[in-house]
Image (tube, rainbow, N blue to C red):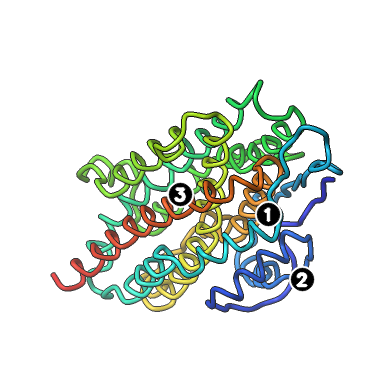
């Protein structure tokens, strides 16, 4: 049931339309190596190939005849999950991400550092906060032991562990690489010219990122506050995880595009040599992670839990949008100061 997709393939294109991205995700899921998402990766690779940062994820689909086994609930279908993902394309987070990136691309040349510092303070916390969120999602699936089917639960976890391990530099068949915290720190230092620790010690608590983290933790661990039944809570957590990964694909792809534009307009002229690895590996890897999250849902979630998935995805869409609108506000405030 497993098939492997390469994280780097061939081609070039930048399209911002949500429908194009959705088609790309569908192609990545089906293992087509010439997908839109994969095609644009070669451009990234050719600019600054991070030779030690290439890896493969392995997708694990539902076991054969998984929905036919006696006594087990019918699993949700791929088409049902895709319909839920399509709702995210029209959601508040996509609008907020567009707004943030429009503002980011237009920061003033002469005050870029003052405008970006508070945003990086928020992003540093926010990006790390997805690690405990992923761990919580995984835990909620593990906690269905004795309730969910042995094989279904195991396959879901076999998918979920990979993006989480990847945050700590661990990938199938490779020695441990830099963690994503190290990569973010390297990116920060190459841009600002000093250590990330200096920003953190000089900055106030990142209130917007802390709020989102609290909302994510609360919701993932309680089925959105509406269920105490383990399998319902796991379905909610799987939907929440899928929403995180699905939106992160847009988020990281657009963030890389925006910083490339800023590099041309501002940073290159200042003699900065940006360390792109953090942005590149995320812009490339999130489509695969979204495909992993998609498969984890297909492994375990009963079809009649579709409303639970929809609610989880809407909850994250709402709170993630609020976070990005807040840091878009910060950019605007900095630009008009
Ligand atoms: Fe990461």
Q: Is mark 3 within 8 Å of ligand 1?
A: yes
Position in image of residue 284 (x %, y %): 62, 60
Q: Closer to us: mark 2 or mark 1?
A: 2
Position in image of residue 140 (x %, y %): 54, 31
N-terminal-most mark, 3 or 2: 2
N-terminal-most mark, 2 or 1: 2
Q: Which of the image's four quarters has the C terminus?
A: bottom left
Give the labeled residue for mark 3. Answer: 184
Which residue sits at x=29%, y=60%? 327
**Secondary element at tag 2:** loop
Q: Which of the image's four quarters has the N terminus?
A: top right
Which residue sits at x=27%, y=68%? 112
**Secondary element at tag 1:** helix
Which residue sits at x=61%, y=43%? 163
Position in image of residue 279 (x %, y %): 51, 58
Whole-number angstrom distance, CA of label 3 to CA of label 1: 17 Å
Callout 2: few (<14), some (14-19), or many (20+) C-alpha neighbours within 10 Å? some
Placement of 259 over or under 156, stated as above or below: below
Callout 3: few (<14), some (14-19), or many (20+) C-alpha neighbours within 10 Å? many
Give the labeled residue for mark 2. Answer: 34
Whole-number angstrom distance, CA of label 3 to CA of label 2: 29 Å
Nearest the viewer among 140 and 336 is: 140
Give the labeled residue for mark 1. Answer: 51
């Amino acid at each position: 049931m497993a098939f492997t997709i390469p994280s780097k393939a061939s081609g070039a294109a930048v399209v911002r339309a949500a429908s194009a991205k959705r088609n790309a995700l569908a192609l990545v899921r089906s293992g087509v190596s010439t997908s839109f998402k994969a095609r644009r990766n070669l451009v990234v690779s050719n600019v600054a190939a991070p030779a030690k940062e290439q890896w493969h994820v392995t997708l694990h689909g539902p076991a054969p005849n998984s929905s036919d086994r006696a006594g087990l609930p019918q699993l949700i279908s791929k088409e049902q999950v895709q319909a839920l993902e399509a709702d995210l394309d029209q959601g508040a987070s996509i609008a907020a991400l567009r707004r943030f990136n429009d503002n980011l691309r237009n920061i003033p040349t002469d005050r870029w550092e003052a405008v970006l510092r508070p945003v990086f303070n928020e992003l540093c916390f926010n990006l790390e906060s997805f690690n405990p969120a992923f761990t919580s999602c995984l835990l909620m699936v593990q906690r269905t032991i004795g309730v969910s089917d042995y094989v279904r639960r195991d396959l879901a976890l076999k998918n979920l562990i990979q993006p989480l391990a990847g945050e700590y530099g661990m990938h199938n068949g490779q020695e441990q690489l830099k963690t994503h915290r190290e990569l973010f720190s390297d990116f920060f230092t190459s841009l600002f010219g000093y250590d990330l620790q200096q920003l953190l010690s000089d900055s106030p608590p990142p209130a917007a990122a802390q709020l989102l983290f609290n909302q994510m933790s609360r919701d993932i661990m309680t089925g959105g506050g509406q269920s105490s039944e383990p399998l319902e809570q796991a379905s909610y957590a799987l939907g929440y995880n899928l929403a995180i990964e699905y939106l992160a694909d847009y988020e990281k792809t657009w963030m890389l595009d925006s910083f490339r534009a800023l590099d041309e307009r501002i940073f290159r002229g200042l003699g900065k040599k940006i360390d792109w690895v953090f942005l590149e590996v995320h812009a490339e890897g999130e489509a695969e992670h979204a495909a992993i999250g998609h498969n984890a849902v297909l492994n375990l979630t009963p079809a009649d839990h579709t409303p639970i998935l929809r609610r989880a995805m809407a909850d994250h869409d709402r709170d993630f949008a609020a976070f990005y609108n807040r840091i878009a506000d910060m950019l605007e405030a900095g630009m008009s100061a």
